[in-house]
């Protein structure tokens, strides 16, 4: 087999691109080879994620490893697949063409995946095949001869097991050798796919692998998990457990973060004299950082479950189960995962829409993701429910406060379905695309992959969200602190500040909803993050309570001063509340313009105002 030497002296280390079908173990192999030496960003000009790592070969030579988005073919159907094809063809601006393609294939599913290998060879690039999951194939009684497969394809083939610490040793040794010469594969032009299909069939027959059987355990499990009745019921039960864990498990670490933030603020405040600098650092930066970090445990816990379900092979099946339901409102099962992510925070949910192939489905999913009840609404819900809904049991022992909270979550879900249906009914008449995805076999999740995935998401959350919220927190601190109250002022200082002036200016807009000027003022910092509304109300009402017990002190006060219709109206407002600025900034980045975020802010504000107005009027009629 001939080889070719690539001159990369002026280009930095050689660039090796990992390419493969979704669920072939490509990312697991990338994590095994690079570990924590990874950089995650977006490709320039698009919203597709770019992952690059550094790899040191046994000889000491270094190479750059690029994990390209998964693709089923070289005829792209989604932004992810388009980026993969453009990078391989050398037509992506700012990205050099790879020096070597490492084609990762699942040894238990060779029929489909070898066709992609032949397509890569046809592009004229040096190709090395990583025959992954050979342990699973062997466990099913099928030994894939890597040397025989290499001879049949005409390119090097190396066996790997990406879930084992030493599962890529032979691959590292092969990468240390000169790159193989490009080998043309099959026919070019319109007959290429048919030619690939025939060639793959001949190769499998030659190797005695043309009768690979499906995974027996996966088949048995799918008879239950994909059952038309039992499947959705089990999925609903699983989601119930996930959300219970998100809120129950996060309570302790959230408390630790709040205590650490309070301690840091107290320590910093003790070191600095009273004045603007201490107020900026303690009330602005430290409090803002705590406001960002306090919800990180919920994000991590939710993504832990998502990664485990994805690694185990169940998540694609959940999308399959919900495809028919979502098809009724004009979406597909691929929208399930982004909407699920939005229950923790709309930002990762919106980012997760990148895998949706249909541009219309992706746009609609982005627009309805904020209607999922994110964790930032919980402090407001807890405050208002605790103050106005009595803690008593109804309907066979069910807690009334819990039922009200469930109703608020359900209202967001029903509203999202209604908006999607309206877009389908009155929007563009695009033909709905059939959901096509390969269901991987069930297997135990890799702790290494879960840990690396969680770490990457922590960094993304802190980098993309933390900076925006911190900047806005400082801005809102300024608005709430200046100008100082005039001499002889008797009201709280915030009433005379820019934020207070804005609250009075907005009062005519919110007064029909039963809101007073204090609520209008609290909604101003709520634009940065909804959970800030609780502390903002405490500031408006001139409480002397600390941050940890503001809600406890505030609840009886608003219960005495607000009417029940006002409280119910505010709850209805927060079901649809216009998105925080961080979410709108994310929508702008994901859609590439201001049209979508402005439309989102406008329609959510309209829904929130209308829902609050109707709720207030009905509550007034029922509870005068």
Image (cartoon, helix red, strand yellow):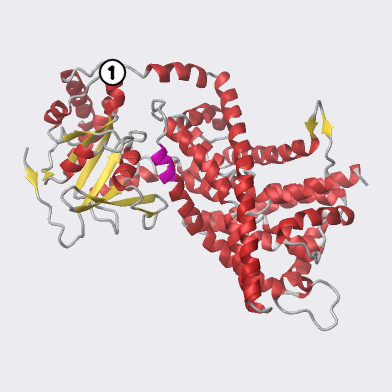
Asked if residue 72 can be seen in this view, the reply is no
Q: In the rendered image, which quarter contains the N terminus?
A: top left
User: Residue at the location (39% across, 46% down)?
Assistant: 79
Q: Residue furthest bottom?
A: 487
Choose top left, top right, bottom left or bottom right for residue 488: bottom right
The percent coordinates of residue 523 (x first, y second) are 72, 60
User: Residue at the location (58% across, 57% down)?
Assistant: 292
User: Residue at the location (12% across, 56% down)?
Assistant: 7
User: Residue at the location (8% across, 44% down)?
Assistant: 3
Question: SS for tag 1?
Answer: loop
Up/down of 97 relative to 430, above or below: below
Up/down of 484 relative to 251, above or below: below
Question: Any magenta on residue 448?
Answer: yes
Classify residue 172 as left or right of residue 484. Answer: left
Classify residue 436 as left or right of residue 260. Answer: left
The percent coordinates of residue 512 (x first, y second) are 82, 56
Question: Any magenta on residue 35?
Answer: no
Residue where numbered disc 1 is placed: 212
Characterize the magenta stretch by its predominant secondary structure. Answer: helix
Q: Residue furthest right?
A: 624
Labels in figure, total: 1
Classify 10 Å Cα crowding around label 1: few (below 14), some (14-19), many (20 and above): some
The percent coordinates of residue 158 (x first, y second) are 19, 34
Classify residue 592 as left or right of residue 188. Answer: right
Asked if residue 56 can be seen in this view, the reply is yes
The percent coordinates of residue 280 (x first, y second) are 63, 73
Using the image as rendered, state which of residue 368 and residue 212 is in the foreground.
Answer: 212
The span picked out in magenta is 447-453
Q: Residue furthest left?
A: 2
Using the image as rendered, state which of residue 584 and residue 419 is in the foreground.
Answer: 584
């Amino acid at each position: 087999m001939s080889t070719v030497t690539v001159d990369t002296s002026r280009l930095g280390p050689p660039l090796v691109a990992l390419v493969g079908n979704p669920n072939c173990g490509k990312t697991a192999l990338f994590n095994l080879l690079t570990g924590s030496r990874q950089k995650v960003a977006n490709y320039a000009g698009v919203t597709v994620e770019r992952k690059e790592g550094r790899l040191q070969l046994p000889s000491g030579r270094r190479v750059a490893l690029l994990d390209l988005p998964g693709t089923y073919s070289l005829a792209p159907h989604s932004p992810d697949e388009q980026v993969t094809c453009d990078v391989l063809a050398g037509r992506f601006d700012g990205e050099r063409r790879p020096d070597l393609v490492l084609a990762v294939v699942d040894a238990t599913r060779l029929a489909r995946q070898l066709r992609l290998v032949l397509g890569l060879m046809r592009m004229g690039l040096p190709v090395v095949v990583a025959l992954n999951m050979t342990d699973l194939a062997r466990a099913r009684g099928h030994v894939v001869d890597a040397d025989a497969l290499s001879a049949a394809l005409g390119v090097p083939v190396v066996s790997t097991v990406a879930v084992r610490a030493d599962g890529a040793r032979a691959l590292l040794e092969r990468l240390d050798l000169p790159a193989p010469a490009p080998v043309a594969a099959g026919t070019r032009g319109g007959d290429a796919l048919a030619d690939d299909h025939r060639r793959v069939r001949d190769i499998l027959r030659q190797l005695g692998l043309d009768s690979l059987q499906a995974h027996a355990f996966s088949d048995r499990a799918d008879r239950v998990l994909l059952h038309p009745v039992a499947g959705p019921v089990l999925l609903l039960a699983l989601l119930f457990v996930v959300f219970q864990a998100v809120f129950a498990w996060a309570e302790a670490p959230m408390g630790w973060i709040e205590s650490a933030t309070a301690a840091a603020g107290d320590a910093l405040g003790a070191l600095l004299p009273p004045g603007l600098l201490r107020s900026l650092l303690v009330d602005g930066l430290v409090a803002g950082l705590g406001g960002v970090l306090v919800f990180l445990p919920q994000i991590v816990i939710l993504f832990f479950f998502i990664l485990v379900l994805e690694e185990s092979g169940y998540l694609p099946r959940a999308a399959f189960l919900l495809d028919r339901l979502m098809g009724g409102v004009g979406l597909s099962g691929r929208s399930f995962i982004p909407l699920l992510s939005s229950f923790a925070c709309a930002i990762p949910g919106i980012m997760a829409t990148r895998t949706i192939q249909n541009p219309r489905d992706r746009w609609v999913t982005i627009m309805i993701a904020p209607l999922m009840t994110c964790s930032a609404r919980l402090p407001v819900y807890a405050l208002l429910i605790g103050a106005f809904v009595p803690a008593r049991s109804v309907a066979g022992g069910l807690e009334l406060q819990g039922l009200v909270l469930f109703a608020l979550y359900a209202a967001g879900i029903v509203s999202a379905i209604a908006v999607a249906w309206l877009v389908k009914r009155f929007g563009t008449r695009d033909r709905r695309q059939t959901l096509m995805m390969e269901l991987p076999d069930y297997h135990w999740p890799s702790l290494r992959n879960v840990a690396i995935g969680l770490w990457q998401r922590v960094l993304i959350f802190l980098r993309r969200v933390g900076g925006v919220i911190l900047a806005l927190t400082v801005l809102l601190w300024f608005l709430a602190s200046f100008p100082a109250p005039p001499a002889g002022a008797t009201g709280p200082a915030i009433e005379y500040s820019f934020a207070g002036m804005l609250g009075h200016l907005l009062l005519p807009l919110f007064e029909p909803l039963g809101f007073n000027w204090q609520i209008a003022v609290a909604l101003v910092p709520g634009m940065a993050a909804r959970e800030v509304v609780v502390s903002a109300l405490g500031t408006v009402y001139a409480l002397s309570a600390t941050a940890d017990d503001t809600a406890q002190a505030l609840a009886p006060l608003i219960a005495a001063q607000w009417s029940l219709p006002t409280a119910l109206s505010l709850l209805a407002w927060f079901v649809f509340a216009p998105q925080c600025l961080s979410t709108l900034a994310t929508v702008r980045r994901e859609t590439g313009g201001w049209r979508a975020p402005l439309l989102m802010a406008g329609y959510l504000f309209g829904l929130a105002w209308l829902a609050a107005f109707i709720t207030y009027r009905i509550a007034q009629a029922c509870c005068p």
